[in-house]
Image: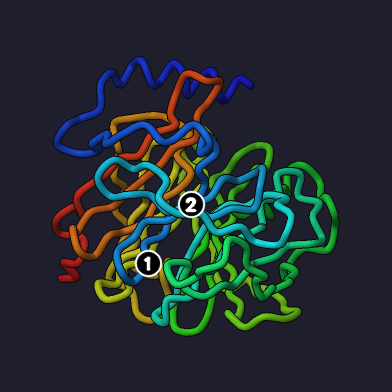
Amino acid sequence: MSGFCLGFYFLFLCGAVNAQSLEELAGLPPVLKGSSGLEFSKAGNIWTINDHGNPVLFQLSMDSFKITKTVHLRNKIKDWEDLSSDVEGNFYVGDFGNNRNNRKDLKIYKIPNPDSITTTTYNPEVIRFELSDQSLFPPPKGKHEFDIEAMVHYNGNLYLFSKSRGEPFKGKVKLYKLSDQPGEQTAVLIDSTFTGEGLMLENWITGATLISDKNILALLSHNKIFFYSCFEGDQFFKGKLTIFDLGHFSQKEAIDFDVESGQFFITDELTRGLIGGKIYKLALPKGLDNCN
């Protein structure tokens, strides 16, 4: 509760959104008050999900951001948190939110490009997985490092980024890797980094997107984007770190990059019926791919 109040106060300190950075586009339809993942299809259509409620993917129009299509999955939502896609156009839905750090049923649903699905419901393939470094459910509060809200796809694998809830907060982000093939798997811890020991809401990770042809990874928090660039392969945290302050505080949960427009799109959840519930865009900051 105190963390939210600090964030709420910060919103008013910041004032209006900086028109040269984050641009507000529209309010989301009321049914999307929990928007927690964004992904562009190969045809340039934008899709989103709610973190709780019905297991539905929503396609939005690019002019008014109204719902133009829905795909219902034949599954129950526990805590959907992010969307990603591969070069073939398959989508991955991450049901791995783990606020209490006690889940033993982490899943990722795999479906074909939702643009191509013609039925109202679809039965997805399922990747069931465990985390290689978790043995206690839950661990002690100081080790609550197993919540996940961010995912990207790269070269046949899925990469998951943890959202630290440890007390005291140290800004630790763990990177896990697993195959994109359905079945039982272990997500292997391959690296970690630190975003900062400041306010939790400003430094924990709630969404991710990868611009693979530019070697740029974007990790989202409530008021920042942590850009990693100039890395090789999947050595994301070995790259150059650039922290971009959005000049705006809200419960931002989803981010994706639109190749056609060269813009990031971001959504936030509607908090207490007052803040958020909107979609924004941000131009790709200059110089991220300058590796000299």
Residue with the mark numbered 1: 41
Quadrant of the image for the C terminus? Answer: bottom left
Please identify, in this view, whether the residue under mark 1 or under mark 2 is nearer the observer: 2
Residue in the picture at 51% in, 39% down: 32
Residue 255 visible? The answer is yes
Q: Looking at the image, is mark 1 or mark 2 earlier in the sequence?
A: 1
Q: Position of residue 71 (x, y in %)?
A: 55, 59
**Camera-nearest residue between 59 and 101:** 59
Dot 2 falls on a residue whose secondary structure is: strand
The image shows residue 236, relative to residue 49, as above or below, that is below
Towards the viewer: 153 or 191? 153
Q: CA distance from mark 1 to mark 2?
A: 12 Å
Q: Give the class, few, some or many, for how many residues have Cα within 10 Å of label 1's Cα (few <14, many ≥20).
A: many
Task: Residue 92: give x, y in percent of width and height.
Answer: 54, 68
Residue 58 picture location, percent across and down: 48, 51
Query: Circle 2 is placed at which residue position?
Result: 58
The answer to which of 229 and 17 lies nearer the viewer is 17
Q: Is residue 201 visible?
A: no
Q: Quadrant of the N terminus?
A: top right
Helix, strand, or loop for circle 1?
loop
Residue at the front extreme, as displayed: 119
Tell me what residue is drawn at x 34 percent, y 71 percent: 42
| Relative height, residue 141 to residue 57 (above, below) | above
Please say which color scheme the image uses: rainbow
Q: Amino acid at mark 1?
A: Ser
* Residue 160 percent location from the top left of the image: 56, 64
